[in-house]
Amino acid sequence: MINVTLIQSDIIWEDRISNLKKYQEKINQIESTDLIILPEMFTTGFSMSPKGISENMNGETIKWMKQNAHKMNSAICGSIIIEEDSKYFNRFIWVNPDGSIHHYDKRHLFSFAGENENYTAGGEKIIIEYKGWKICPLICYDLRFPVWSRNSEDYDLLIYVANWPDKRKSAWKSLLTARAIENQCYVIGVNRVGEDSKNYYSGDSSLINALGETLYTNSHIEEIYSNTISKYDLNKVRTQLPFLNDKDNFKIIN
């Protein structure tokens, strides 16, 4: 069993200090959890102007995540803008309670908004092992690419953090469910609410089980939601319906 907490929140445009203050107030309301999940680019919004608002891996947000992971005795994760080797990355950061870090750089950059012109794509999928669970972190647009998301690593939980606009929420909901069913895993999608200069975001953050059943979803409001998910229930589904045994073998060429 693992307790997961989804934080669906508005994001103040390109204002790290105000956003961290907002999230701190929300985290302070959580009594106990094993994992806190924040949206994509949770300190800035989905900005295509990374210069001047990016951080490095020793920056303020990483320090803030470490402090909260330690204080809450919980892992904390979400994506932020990172500058490294004169390149910018939309990077998913996972911080364990002991301060150790895992990271994943967004593979599929959203060319429709020019993300590919301002950021460098990642090329490595990672699996995080935490409290007996194997967890695969991905970011927003990755959701549209089932080959990259495919459960070739026998992971248990697939996480998407996002800034996914309301006008395409039907795709968001449908694809989260599809990824859960085809990969026989829990899927968590944490999306923002509110608006920026280009889009309105309805949230629709969700928790879905391996049968494709929605255990939680909510729209339009800021909310902190926690629930406990069961490895026993997951393994029961996989034993009774061993569909992953028949999956295709393939290799992704970068």
Image (tube, helix red, strand yellow):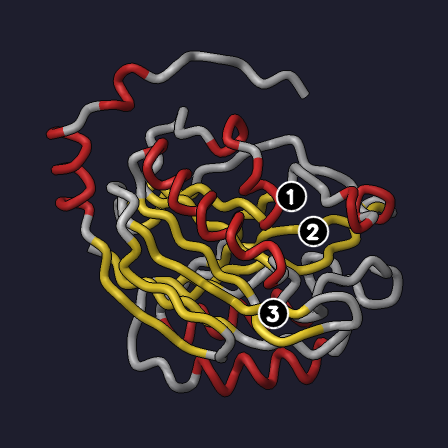
Which residue is nearer to you in this view: 117 or 65? 117
C-alpha distance separating marks 2 and 3: 18 Å
- Find residue 174 and report its horizontal and vertical position in percent: 45, 46
Category of crowding for the residue at label 3, using alpha-carbon neighbours closer than 10 angstroms: few (below 14), some (14–19), many (at least 20): some
The label number, if any, that marks residue 129 in the structure image: none
- Find residue 245 and report its horizontal and vertical position in percent: 26, 18
Q: Please tell me whether mark 2 sits on a helix, a strand or a loop.
A: strand
The answer to which of marks 2 and 1 sits earlier in the sequence is: 2
Category of crowding for the residue at label 2, using alpha-carbon neighbours closer than 10 angstroms: few (below 14), some (14–19), many (at least 20): many
Category of crowding for the residue at label 1, using alpha-carbon neighbours closer than 10 angstroms: few (below 14), some (14–19), many (at least 20): many
- The answer to whether mark 2 and mark 1 are in CB contact below 8 A is yes
x 25%, y 23%: residue: 243
The label number, if any, that marks residue 106 in the structure image: 1
Residue bearing mark 3: 63
x 46%, y 71%: residue: 219
Using residue 163 as the reference point, say whether residue 217 is left or right of it.
left
Q: Please tell me whether mark 1 sits on a helix, a strand or a loop.
A: loop
Vertical position of residue 128 compared to residue 170: above or below: above
Residue bearing mark 2: 90
Q: Amino acid at mark 2?
A: Asn
Which residue is nearer to you in this view: 45 or 94? 45
- Find residue 189 and report its horizontal and vertical position in percent: 46, 55
The answer to which of marks 2 and 3 sits earlier in the sequence is: 3
x 19%, y 46%: residue: 231
C-alpha distance separating marks 1 and 3: 21 Å
Vertical position of residue 164 compared to residue 236: above or below: below
Q: Amino acid at mark 3?
A: Lys
Q: Please tell me whether mark 3 sits on a helix, a strand or a loop.
A: helix
Q: Quadrant of residue 81?
A: bottom right
Front tag of 2 and 3: 2
